[in-house]
Amino acid sequence: MLTSLQNPLIKHIRKLHTAKGRRHQQQFILEGTHLVEEACEAGYPLEVVCCTPDWQSQHQPLWKLITQQAHRIELIDQRVLNAIATTVHPDGIIATAPRFSPIPRSHLQPTPSPHLGLALETLQDPGNLGTIIRTAAAAGVEGLLLSADSVDLDHPKVLRASVGAWFRLPMRVCSDLAAELRAAQQQGIQIVATLPSATQVYWELDFQKPTIILLGNEGAGLSQPLIELADQQVNIPLYRSVESLNVGICAALMLYEAQRQRSIINVVRKCSQM
């Protein structure tokens, strides 16, 4: 059992708390039973798993999966757990995983021609990104593109806010988001930008076409080049002088409107075939 905070492994894991450490080590942290379980179910490789003896005894089925999937397993005491955790009350287990997984790329990358995709530019809040990932997975989004100047996709708060959906949604970080969107347009996908100045309300748009919804920075919104690139611009109506909505709320409204329209068409098609 590891009990020393000076152990090289413990020092290594603590470095993963920072973006610099994650980039240098090319690893990130999975904290908590649910995230580790989701990683195992998705077949995502685990480098190191550290847990307390109490956690091990209480989670035998998951423990068996971990022993088959992790490269290294260590039992640790509560003091060490508290030192490597990013939360105030860790539940007994922390793992590290590679930033770029060797599992099939089809699991990680958006499909070339999604019927419904999402693109995020310069998103800064990890909680917002995690919430959007969770919402996108629930709404059936086929791929998410994230500009490289956004918060780290594997930031601990992003992973926690996604509640495991991080492993279910194909995602990619883009060094040139505009180029990715232009390539999508060439495949017949409409790019839809959300703007407060747009004259078209989002529910008036035809979401039955292959679509990528484009959302911008929490404060500044979308950059002018991406606004000009978009095929359609829509707004979300706001009343009582409310200036804006949280970007996660905007994503949810747009995505579920797209699903609502597509569900109606599916029902109509089924009825016509009866």
Image (tube, rainbow, N blue to C red):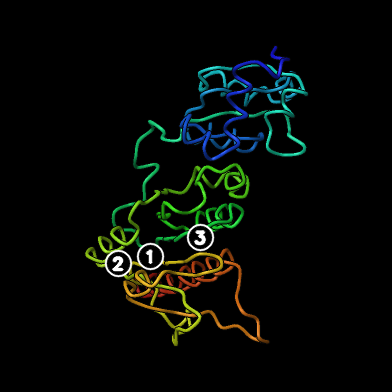
Label 2 sits on a secondary structure element that is loop
Q: Is residue 191 above or below residue 139?
A: below
Q: Quadrant of residue 75?
A: top right
Residue 263 place in picture, x, y as percent = 45, 69
> Amino acid type of disc 3?
Ala
- Is residue 111 toward the left or the right of residue 164 in the image? left
Label 1 sits on a secondary structure element that is strand
Q: Nearer the viewer, mark 1 or mark 3?
A: 1
Q: Which of these two is toward me, 15 or 132?
A: 15
Of callouts 2 and 1, which one flags the residue occurring earlier in the amino acid sequence? 2
The quadrant of the rendering that contains the N terminus is: top right
**Number of disc labels:** 3
Q: CA distance from mark 1 to mark 3?
A: 13 Å
Residue 90 place in picture, x, y as percent = 73, 34
**Disc marking residue 71:** none
Q: Quadrant of residue 226?
A: bottom left
- Is residue 269 toward the left or the right of residue 203 in the image? left
> Amino acid type of disc 1?
Ile
Write the residue at 54% across / 56% down: 124
Per the image, the residue denoted by label 1 is 212
Cβ–Cβ below 8 Å for labels 2 and 1? yes
Q: Residues within 10 Å of mark 2 (few under 14, many from 20)?
A: many
> Amino acid type of disc 2?
Ile
Q: Residues within 10 Å of mark 1 (few under 14, many from 20)?
A: many
Q: CA distance from mark 2 to mark 1?
A: 7 Å
